[in-house]
Image (cartoon, rainbow, N blue to C red):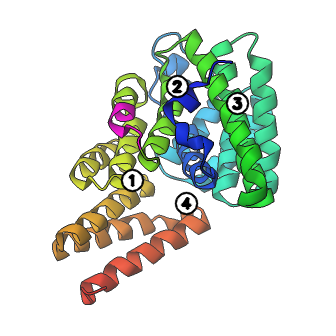
Amino acid sequence: MLKSKMTVRFPVLQTIVPAKLYRLVTVAFAATLALNVWASPSWAADPFRTKEPRNIGNKTEAAFKAIFQQGDYQSADRYLQEALSAEPKEPLAYAMKASLAYTNNDLATLDTYSKKTLETAQNLISTDPLRGNLYTAVGLFLEGAVILQREGTVSGAPQALSRLRQVYDHLDKAEAVSPNDPELNLLRGYMDLMLSVNLPFANPEQAIQKLEKNASPQYLVDRGIALAYRDLKQYSQALEYANRALKATPDNPESYYLKAQILREQARKEKNSQLMQEAVGHFDKALSKKSQLPSDLTRQIERERRRAAESLSNPAK
């Protein structure tokens, strides 16, 4: 039997517990599935393609805009409720609902909509094998996240890893249909990037180049690469891509949060109080719109902001 590309690219997945990877990649999916809209007005509901666009749905589009133009999770959730009623055959709407549930630590809703994502995507395969297989992969991945949260790392890891193998099998099928598709390459690119950054012997630069070459929209490409360089502790490169993302979405508090994190780490590395002060300022800009954000995320930003401010008054910390 041929090995899946997952095993070929990331052989150490055979021997590690995938809980951390699931957390990382689910966050990536949560970011990736809630997308800004950059298509033409007549097909504005496809945020990925200018050629051969799919009419994904205006209600889902509105949720995309709420998340990544304004960073407004509260409005996005309302739009998604409308999307589920008006566009019941669109797997992206269910996947996005599941991703928001993950962000809110709502296991029951995550379970419900991971199953709906999978069911709707499987029904799409016969008419659109590219997106059908792509969102079947997403649905399986989200099911794995449910297993890990419900059963814990020790009991759930074998089942979750099995799901991860199936995820890559369906991504391979989608790639066989259209290897340069921007939606496929954005989702797969985020997954490959998060795995390669966090696994030994992987090649993050190769994943970065592939994401930059084939994925769209550009804002999420820049954001993903900024996250990767942040985790690789290459802060100058991370800041370059974070600035690009911030320029494209200046109303999104998460754009300021990402830049604040990078500035904080660069300040620690260089022992630079001016950079740390800039980081605090960007944390403050993110928190100025905290009513839009999930409560857990708001608390996380507040903790990080507090620690950054404390380091200014007590550099030894």
Q: Is residue 249 visible?
A: no
Task: Say which label, 3 or 4, has the lower sequence index.
Answer: 3
Q: Nearer the viewer, mark 2 or mark 3?
A: 3
Dot 3 corresponds to which residue? 166
Q: Is residue 277 visible?
A: yes
Return the x and y of residue 241 as percentages of the image width and height.
29, 44
Q: CA distance from mark 3 to mark 1?
A: 33 Å
The residue under label 2 is which amino acid type?
Glu
| Left or right relative to 297: residue 94 | right
Q: CA distance from mark 3 to mark 4?
A: 35 Å
Stretch of the chain drawn in magenta:
201-208
Q: CA distance from mark 2 to mark 3?
A: 19 Å
Dot 2 corresponds to which residue? 183
Q: Residue 292, which numbered label?
A: 4
User: Label 1's element?
Assistant: helix
Quarter occupied by the C terminus: bottom left
Dot 1 corresponds to which residue? 255
The residue under label 1 is which amino acid type?
Ser
Residue reaching furthest bottom? 314
